[in-house]
Amino acid sequence: MKKIILMLAFAATLFAVNAQEKPTTGDYFNGLTRPLTFDRMIAPYALEVTFNKTVHIIFPSAIRYVDLGSSDLLAAKAGGAENVLRVKAAVRDFSQESNLAVITEDGAYYTFNVKYADEPVKLSVEMVDFIYNGKAGTRPNSLDVQLEELGEESPFLVNLVMKSVYKNNKREIKHIGSKRFGIEYSLKGLYVHNRLLYFHTQLKNTSNVPFSVDYITFKIVDKKVAKRTAIQEQVIRPLSEYNNVREIGGKTTERTVFTLPLFTIPDGKRLLVELHEKQGGRNQSFFAKNANLVRAKVIDELNVKH
């Protein structure tokens, strides 16, 4: 009996020594990884959903990506609204908490912890457009998501530049535009920042009849070809836009800022910007030359106004 007690005591001592030599770290990789601390965490919002009602979340920018944590949730963009997300429960009274992640066009990442509630208090939620000031506790989402088409440019900075151009509302260009049937479509300004071009356009409806926008195109076309073909056109697709309204009422003026990849125009060609009316004949178009592009005003990001 004495021998057994001595053996147990020795084993306990050996275990204590090993425990001191290899303290537990709480991870599964024997201390070879660094733990994720709370300052790395993107704080989620709390969201309640139910089966018989729909929760609407309004974001400050168009929705690019949505991911649902489980099949207990249903989510989709609201029809005709790129920045509104509809969320509801797919089943009644689901018990386990789920989550929801959203990425928007301005590079912001939002995350939500989602629970079921019979009567959610917040059925319409607005995600305030804010500027992260670097202080602890003021970062409810991430603004570091990179979008493929913008390359290395920050989507958040691109959005700030577009907003700044729109807010300043300066008329840098006075001679490029078109005017027909009570509709005026003009280029107010042309700007460059890093490897992106910003087109500030204005659409003015001087008639009493609303104007519905079908689509807007940017094309590089030959100067001397009367009838253009697909071979003779190079379409430049906007990467982003700010305040791209779809309908302009009578006696109303609206402005839009488009972000395009940096380009120049070869000799013998020019840029054609076309505005098409939905189910109408008041289409507008204007041309810009390479000289206009190379004289684009440089935007200093230090002067971008929030």
Image (cartoon, rainbow, N blue to C red):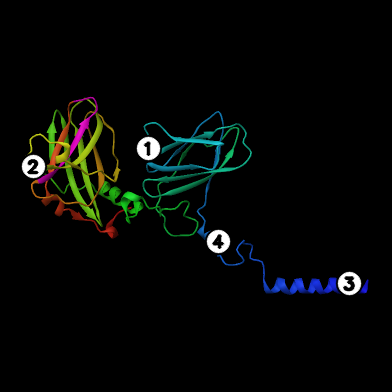
Asked if residue 52 is among those painted magenta in the image, a careful observer would answer no
Tell me the residue at 17%/43% (across/down).
Answer: 187
From this view, report whether residue 77 is shown above or below residue 257: above
Q: Which residue is mark 3?
A: 5
Rendered location of residue 247, percent (x, y) = 27, 31
The magenta span reads 269-280
Q: Which residue is mark 2?
A: 223
Rendered location of residue 98, percent (x, y) = 57, 42
Amino acid type for the residue under numbered disc 3: Ile
Amino acid type for the residue under numbered disc 2: Lys
Q: Nearer the viewer, mark 2 or mark 3?
A: 3
Lower position in the chain sequence, tag 2 or tag 1: 1
Badge 1, how many Cα within 10 Å: few under 14, some, many 20+?
some
Q: Nearer the viewer, mark 4 or mark 3?
A: 3
Alpha carbons under labels 2 and 1: distance apart: 37 Å
The secondary element bearing badge 3 is classed as helix
